[in-house]
Image (tube, rainbow, N blue to C red):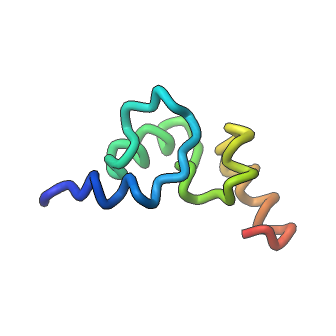
Amino acid sequence: MECKKERNLKNCNCSYEPCSRKGTCCDCLAYHLRSRELPACCFPREAERSYDRSFEHFARLVAQNKI
């Protein structure tokens, strides 16, 4: 499968500048899942900037109807 990195970068809201996985969604997802986290694209911009990408943070946002 061909990676669509350039297209993915247009929709990537990751604010962590030195991230080497930006645009390479399969690598990003695998990295975060190993740490019981979700990638930035699962969070609204303000929530993403907190760098708390835990499942628990995501669940709180869902419960608050922010996602």
Residue 10 spot, x, y in % from top left: 41, 58
Q: Is residue 14 left or right of residue 49?
A: left
Quick one: quadrant of the C terminus?
Answer: bottom right
Residue nearest the viewer, comparing 64 with 5: 5
**Residue 37, picture quadrant:** top right
Q: Is residue 42 left or right of residue 22?
A: right
Q: Between 52 and 18, which is closer to the camera in this rendering?
A: 18
Residue 32 at what x, y percent from top left? 50, 41
Image location of residue 51, percent across then percent down: 68, 37
Q: Viewed as shown, does residue 35 lie left or right of 8?
A: right
For image coordinates 34% across by 43% down, the residue present is 27
Q: Looking at the rendering, in which quadrant would you find the N terminus? A: bottom left
Q: Residue at x 74, y 51 (%)?
A: 47
Q: Residue furthest top?
A: 18
On screen, residue 59 above or below 52: below
- Relative to 20, say whether 65 is above or below: below
Residue 40, given in percent of the width and then of the height, sits at 57, 49
**How many marks do you count on the picture?**
0
Instruction: Tell which residue pokes out farthest to the right in this image.
Output: 64
Q: Is residue 21 placed above or below 45 in the rendered structure?
A: above
Residue furthest out toward the bottom: 65
Q: Quadrant of residue 31?
A: top left
Q: Residue at x 75, y 51 (%)?
A: 46
Tell whether 4 sits left or right of 19: left
